Image: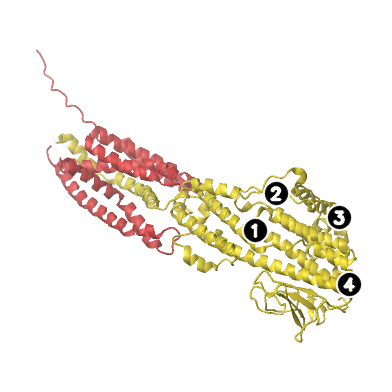
Chain colours: A yellow, B red
Amino acid sequence: MQPPARLRQIALWTRRPFHRAVWRLVLSAGMLAVLAILLVRSTAENPHTNLIESRKALLAFKPPPVPDEENAALEYEKAFKLFVSYGKLTGKESFNDDRIPQDPVFMLGVPASDLDQPQVQQFLNANIASYAWLDAAMLKSKINWGHDYMLPAGLGNDNRYRLLDASRRMSLRALVRARAGDHAGAAHDLKAIWIFASHVDSDGFLFDKMMGESFRSIAITCMQLIVLYYTPQRAEDIETYRDSFGPLPDPRASARQVALQELANTTYIIDWFAETDEQTLHRMMSIPLFGADPIASRLPYAMVYGSDRKALIETNSEALECAKRDELAPDDQELWRKHQHGPVVFAKLYSVNSGIRRIQLQLLKEADTLQCMKMALIELAFRARNGKERFTLDDRGTLVLKGTADFSTGRPLAICVDTQELVISARQKVKYPAGTIRVYSFGMNGEDDYGQNSWSIGHAGKRDGDDPCFILPPLKAKQP
Amino acid sequence: MTESVAPSKPREKPLDLWPLRWLITAMPFAVAGLFIYDNNYLTYAWMAGCIFGGALCLYFGHILLFRLQCGLFELMAMTIVLGLFEGLMLSTPGLTRIALWLSPLVLAWILYGAVVGLSRARLLDVTGTLATVAHLFAAWLGIAWMALAGLGAAMLILGDGSNLVSAEMRRWCWPLLILAAAGLVLDFWIGIKTAKRAREVLNSNL
């Protein structure tokens, strides 16, 4: 039994609930967070433990250190420093008001006569020192950019873009040299671009690989322009060109390697966000209330992290398995239907499935185009030696090259004579009459589109088809 | 001649630390004012919550130990509930830091519920140990009903389209809402009984 006075005090305290009502409201907000933690328990994963594991897996892909004297990256650094841009040289914009390139770096694909403009030579002269360092870099096979693998996706790495610029400059010099009849010099420049491509994708991330493929695409396009604009007449020159592109790559092995590294990379990224990056968590989880608060940002993402990580690993693993089986990565929607079992935040952002699919297609397309190019150069060299075509086309003007097989579907390459005129520059109406020869593969659809595709130079207007191809001028044609 | 002096009645100490009571009540208003003044201070909301929880612990701990003189069995029940919650929270992977910051609030909830439960038991003249502990549990549930209802309703509203609520979490929606309803009903019912009894006590000539 309570003493009467104490009982009165308790009764009095009970009858004055104002303070406790206020406290209860505040306490409820805290208890809501407590209960949320308890609900998350069953699915919560520890980002710290995961980060240690995924960091280890990613670092296994880091290229070995390269001594300074063997490291091409140092030569590139010097070349980048000495580069004089068109803007710096002339004070003008790269493109004029009609979006026509004035900057020589962007002149890949312009009519040949444009290369005679004084600013082109002025630009090349101003960059002699930069070109010399690029020439030195291509002599080195080893490279280590020293990228920080712990920064997600190598962000902050602008060497890729600088090297893309260097590739464009090399293609410019190749065209200028070919126009001047220096085919050995032009072949050297194309070889340089090919080596730059292997240097830029040395880190093996998806983005690096995409950049590498765009470099290779520049080199092949440049070769195509040289063949159409300044067709080399000596078989030795043609063979030098052919050799400058190196052996045929294995596009499937490249895709497998990228998929493997990206699985490690994206898993690391998601763990890194969960463990260290409050800013991104705050932004992604839309918590305007607490700002980029290190604690407030944690709880909402912890609710999702387990299912987010699981979905990411499952989708990327499936893309990897497809790459291992030499199949194209599956359609994104189908993949998510299969693997999204819970809420996701970063998983869809960092799923590399569509990226892997794109690089697979790009690698196959590039490898087949290269194969067509090499075959076309063999034909061109034969033409240069014998003054006639090596092949005899059937009544339809086509020929299937037996004993060859493309990378896309394993079907043989083919040759056809184009029945339409070939427009090289729609702006200045530069074109070949009908009769150009297309060496082509049947592409991913495996159908004979007569060497038509939607990406390389060709007929003006919309075109169908997905045949990687390389175009030769007619045997006795006047160059445009 | 001697004068007889009536012995003075010893003064009963007050039930609570009333300055602390006012200080704690002023705290949320002051912090809200600070946040309205400068939104950047919201980053420190956890710190403010932690201090608020600590102050509540002091206030209710003082009443519980020095005024209500809770028994060993009640203390054991409190320790078990506290240990259960803290253990689960602190061992949740990746959330140890946030769990640490929330610990004072959990302790405050336990002590608050214990004081409310014990005071109700004393007023209603409940003397059995188990019945007293049942009052403690009713008070804990009653205090937490808003949090339970808030969480359950939030998950129900967010539904399938949410990128926060998994199917597993959604399964807890209705149990949480039912617990909240039970807490509310108990709180209301026992609250009315207690208020009636308190009125009687205050009106009596005790």
Name the chain letter of the residue that bears numbered label 4. Answer: A
Q: Identify residue type, mark 2.
A: Trp
Q: Residues within 10 Å of mark 4 (few under 14, many from 20)?
A: few
Q: Does label 1 lie on the same chain as label 2?
A: yes
Give the quadrant of the C terminus of chain A.
bottom right
Chain under disc 1: A
- In the figure, B58 relative to B154: above or below? above
Residue on which the image places disc 3 = A126
Q: Residue at x 35, y 48 (%)?
A: A31
Amino acid type, label 4 = Arg
- Which residue corresponds to mark 1? A207
Q: Secondary structure at mark 4?
A: helix
C-alpha gap between disc 4 and disc 1: 42 Å
Is residue B15 found left or right of B36 in the rendered image? Answer: left
Q: Residue at x 11, y 17 (%)?
A: B3
Q: Are marks 2 and 4 in contact (CB under 8 Å)?
A: no
Query: CA–CA distance between discs 2 and 4?
Result: 44 Å
Q: Could you tell which of marks 4 and 1 lies nearer the N-terminus?
A: 1
| Nearer-the-camera pick, A128 or A253 | A253
Write down the residue under mark 2.
A145
Q: Are marks 2 and 4 on the same chain?
A: yes
Disc number for residue A385: 4
Please indicate, yes or no, whether residue A97 appears anywhere in the rendered image.
no
